[in-house]
């Protein structure tokens, strides 16, 4: 029986940390060798990190990536290792290096370059023109990169139809958004079953600026069944034994590939031989050279049951926050605790990401702050075990009003005075950040960010916006989920049940300016994420004048969003790279 032990090593790479990424890959190779792995794959761009953006315009960076790729080859004695890197001739390529038995034997260059959403690969890379396959013993291996496998036909079908690939390895850096894991699984199962090939998909894991990579690497057999699956949001090594005779037998009983070859008039792909070492006396060669029974016992990793989206989103927010803070050299985060649900959820995520000793809370009451808000902020801090400082804004606010009184003479108080309070709070938090080296986490959610329900240089002042891509209705679901996490519920019940308020004037609630969030969020989702027109949204059942007002608020707030801090992407279309609109525009839907 032909058996190949395949390993997928999903690592948390950091863009530009060539030495650290190289070290992670080397450690993965050593772990896989101890488990008797024949074929080991690392994610797309594992050495440079993804996305490296304009680092790719620096020749010294390109040289460093290629040199470190080459230095991995001696570590691969007796193994085949596929690692994401960059390649160059007269141009630059997103590439997979195939390292085999101590040598860099061949390279696959990514052919389908994504240029949508967060992707901008046409800016940097030339698409590959060839579609090589790699022959290890009797087994033909197709290698491709991320986007290459998402299209029916294309590189995968060519590798199977023209060259008989039985194993397809796809190295990927596929960013997370809620629900993507299920669609990814469906796609991979379809590719495997349609091509009667085992598909091995390895994904990056970790946070990189606004993007989170979820891992979740999978090994799928020729029938589309998931054999093994990596953990989500964690580094992992996934191993499975592939029955290659099973692939051959499946193809004998299914004429589809045979007929496809008859009608395919393309040229065969280049074939790169991966020769086996000379076997000792009495030994065999190729894939069968090491008996499966002689290898370390393999603990089978069964495919995980699909998780609910709420805990999945929560874990993505924790990972994105942890990696942004730590990868940018911070140890502690500071959060303004208002007693409201957004700051409470942000604090919970920060504590789960960094630990309570590395999160500081600041209560900044004014004359409009309700006693319940102060009590709830104090209770939250106690429940989470974090430090809470109280720095009132009243005296500073009064001094502002006195200083501005001559300029404001004859004008009634309005939103100006509300925003002054928010900006004082932003100054307090930034002062603490400067003094202690803390990173300020802002607490605005996607609903507020969409309509500009925030104060520029006030509650938008900070380094990272944890809930920037989380709708307010999802904020409530995440808060309830976190409170069910076992032990004492950290978020006071009153924080969840009280009407939300900015507390910048007497008896203020969010609904003074906005419709209820269960009305607002569906309108925003259709406009922001789906680009629906006003009348299309109204036809679903919303008042057309309300829709028109909300759309105008979204458009008018573009200048605020352009100046806001980055935040974790968890929806299919987040503000930032996903949604790029001009600030100056007279277009109206």
Image (tube, helix red, strand yellow):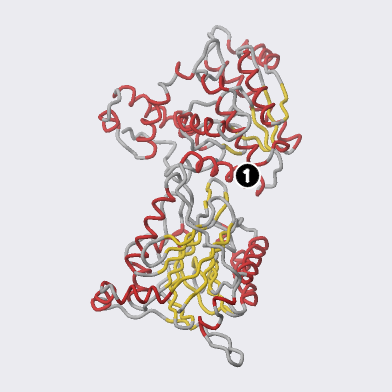
| Residue 259 vertical placement versus 42 (above, below) | below
Instruction: Find the residue positioned furthest to the right.
Output: 435
* Residue 134 placement (x, y as % from top left): 46, 78
| Residue 420 vertical placement versus 310 (above, below) | above
Image quarter of the C terminus: top left
**Count of residue discs:** 1
Answer left or right for 63 relative to 164: right
| Residue 400 vertical placement versus 562 (above, below) | above
Answer left or right for 429 relative to 155: right
Instruction: Find the residue positioned furthest to the front.
Output: 293
Dot 1: few (<14), some (14–19), or many (≥20) neighbours within 10 Å?
many
Say which of 20 and 315 sits in front.
315
Residue pointed to by mark 1: 322
| Residue 80 vertical placement versus 177 (above, below) | below
* Residue 250 placement (x, y as % from top left): 33, 73
Say which of 429 and 259 sits in front.
259
Label 1 secondary element = helix
Residue drawn 60% across the image and 67% down it:
65
* Residue 144 placement (x, y as % from top left): 44, 68
Answer left or right for 579 relative to 379: left
Say which of 9 and 580 sits in front.
9
| Quadrant housing residue 547 | top left
Image quarter of the N terminus: bottom left
Say which of 509 and 349 sits in front.
349
| Quadrant housing residue 36 | bottom right
Residue drawn 66% across the image and 47% down it:
328
Instruction: Find the residue positioned furthest to the top.
Output: 410
* Residue 281 placement (x, y as % from top left): 61, 93
Answer left or right for 269 relative to 428: left
């Amino acid at each position: 029986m032909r058996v190949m032990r395949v390993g997928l090593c999903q690592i948390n790479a950091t863009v530009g940390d060539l030495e650290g990424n190289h070290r992670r890959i080397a450690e993965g190779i050593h772990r896989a060798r101890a488990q008797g792995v024949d074929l080991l794959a690392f994610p797309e761009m594992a050495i440079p990190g993804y996305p490296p953006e304009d680092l790719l315009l620096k020749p010294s960076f390109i040289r460093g990536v290629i040199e470190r790729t080459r230095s991995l080859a001696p570590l691969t004695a007796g193994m085949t290792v596929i690692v994401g890197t960059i390649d160059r001739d007269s141009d630059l390529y997103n590439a997979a290096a195939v390292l085999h038995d101590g040598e860099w034997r061949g390279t696959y260059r990514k052919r389908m370059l994504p240029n949508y959403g967060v992707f901008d690969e046409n800016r940097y890379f030339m698409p590959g023109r060839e579609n090589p396959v790699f022959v290890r013993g009797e087994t033909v291996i197709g290698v491709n990169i991320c986007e290459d496998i998402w299209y029916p036909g294309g590189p995968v079908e060519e590798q199977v139809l023209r060259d008989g690939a039985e194993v397809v390895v796809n190295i990927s850096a596929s960013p997370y958004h809620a629900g993507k894991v299920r669609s990814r699984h469906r796609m991979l199962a379809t590719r495997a079953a349609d091509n009667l090939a085992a598909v091995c998909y390895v994904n990056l894991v970790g946070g990189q600026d606004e993007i989170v990579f979820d891992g979740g690497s999978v090994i799928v057999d020729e029938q589309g069944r998931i054999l093994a699956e990596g953990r989500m949001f964690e580094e992992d090594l996934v191993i499975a034994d592939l029955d290659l005779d099973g692939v051959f037998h499946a193809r004998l009983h299914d004429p589809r590939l045979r007929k496809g070859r008859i009608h395919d008039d393309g040229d065969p792909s280049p074939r790169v031989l991966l020769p086996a070492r000379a076997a000792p006396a009495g030994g065999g060669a190729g894939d069968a050279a090491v008996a499966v029974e002689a290898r370390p016992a393999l603990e089978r990793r069964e495919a995980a049951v699909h998780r609910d989206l709420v805990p999945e989103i929560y874990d993505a927010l924790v990972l994105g926050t942890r990696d942004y803070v730590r990868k940018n050299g911070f140890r502690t985060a500071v959060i303004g605790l208002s007693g409201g649900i957004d700051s409470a959820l942000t604090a919970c995520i920060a504590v789960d990401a960094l630990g309570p000793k590395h999160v500081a809370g600041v209560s900044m009451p004014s004359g409009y702050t309700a006693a319940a808000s102060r009590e709830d902020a104090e209770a939250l801090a106690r429940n989470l075990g974090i430090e809470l400082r109280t720095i009132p804004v009243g005296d500073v606010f009064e001094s502002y009003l006195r200083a501005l009184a001559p300029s404001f003479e004859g004008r009634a108080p309005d939103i100006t005075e509300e925003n002054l309070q928010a900006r004082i709070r932003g100054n307090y938090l930034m002062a603490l950040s400067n003094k202690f080296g803390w990173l300020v986490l802002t607490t605005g959610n996607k609903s507020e960010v969409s309509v500009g329900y925030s104060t520029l240089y006030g509650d938008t002042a900070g380094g990272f916006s944890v809930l920037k891509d989380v709708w307010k209705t999802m904020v409530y679901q995440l808060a309830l989920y976190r409170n069910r996490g076992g032990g004492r519920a950290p978020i006071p019940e009153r924080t969840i049940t009280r009407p939300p308020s900015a507390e910048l004037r007497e008896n203020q609630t969010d609904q003074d300016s906005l419709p209820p969030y269960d009305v607002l969020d569906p309108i925003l989702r259709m406009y922001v994420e789906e680009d629906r027109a006003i009348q299309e949204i109204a036809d679903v059942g919303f008042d057309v004048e309300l829709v028109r007002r909300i759309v105008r608020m979204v458009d008018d707030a573009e200048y605020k969003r352009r100046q806001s801090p980055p935040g974790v992407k968890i929806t299919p279309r987040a503000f930032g790279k996903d949604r790029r609109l001009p600030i100056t525009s007279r277009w109206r839907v």
